[in-house]
Image: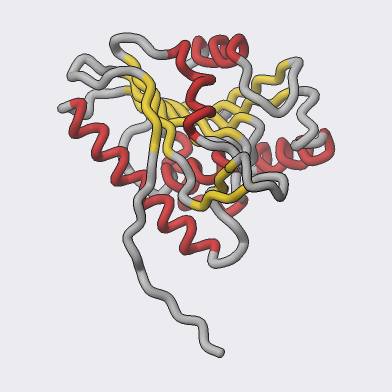
Amino acid sequence: MEKKKISVSKTARYFQAGSISNKIKNVWFVFHGYGMLSEFFIKKFESLVDNETIIIAPEATSRFYLEGKYERVGASWITKVDKEDDISDNSNFFNLLYNNILNQIGHDKINLNILGFSQGGSAACRWVLNESFNINSICFWGSDIPKECLTEEHRHRWNSMKISIVIGEKDHVVPIEYREKFKELISNYNLNYKLIEYDGDHRITEDVLIEYVKTI
């Protein structure tokens, strides 16, 4: 047996909160976690929308049924099988979407803020570190940072944006032992970041989100 590959075109979807015009100054790209859909994830950010702010939530193109039932559907950004292809396909999707949004706005004088939740943090990170457009901030909420992103090659890019890590103290998905190892990893890398810990679990809550936004 021989494994072979071909490139195919695929329709990807995203959801948008807020209306696009040339008055837009703030653009948020928010990346959902494993097993989630952007249609519902984006609702967590609607309080940020105003005449100058829009939210863009891309959705992973690999969808599947949850809980072994043909009812609820979720999506995943990546698996260990042909991982590099997933990363490349995701980046192509994000770049096309980003350029499409800029074209609709009519200018590139925006504050681009990135927020990745859980698995979405890794997807967002791998994208932005390999591109050159300006980013105001990136937030890893209930998420880690892939080890391959913490290299000298990427240090200048890291230093060009505001970095925040948000974690719930009762987050069952990211246990305390893992959190401590993660903190050690990024501290050894001398990553300049702001840590926000709150009384909550593995989910985005509006009050913490609003307080986080005030810091950037």
Taking the spot 84% from the left edge, 38% from the top edge, the residue there is 177
Q: Residue furthest right?
A: 177
Query: Where, quadrant-wise, is the N terminus in this rendering?
Result: bottom right
| Place of residue 216 in the rendered image (x, y in percent of width and height, measured from the top left) | 47, 16
Residue 165's place in the image compared with 53, above or below, is below
| Place of residue 58 in the rendered image (x, y in percent of width and height, measured from the top left) | 42, 38
Total marks placed: 0
Residue 114's place in the image compared with 81, above or below, is above
Taking the spot 57% from the left edge, 10% from the top edge, the residue there is 211
Q: Which sits in the foreground, 133 or 74?
A: 74
Relative side of 108 to 98, left or right: left
Q: Residue furthest bottom?
A: 1
Relative side of 60 to 172, left or right: left
Taking the spot 40% from the left edge, 31% from the top edge, the residue there is 15
Relative side of 137 to 186, left or right: left
Taking the spot 70% from the left edge, 20% from the top edge, the residue there is 197
What coloring was used for the rendering? secondary structure
Q: Residue furthest left?
A: 106
| Place of residue 132 in the rendered image (x, y in percent of width and height, measured from the top left) | 32, 43
| Viewer can see residue 163 | no
Q: Which sits in the foreground, 169 or 20?
A: 20
Q: Which sits in the foreground, 206 or 167?
A: 206
| Viewer can see residue 44 | yes
| Place of residue 130 in the rendered image (x, y in percent of width and height, measured from the top left) | 40, 49
Relative side of 34 to 215, left or right: right
Residue 79 occupies quadrant: bottom right
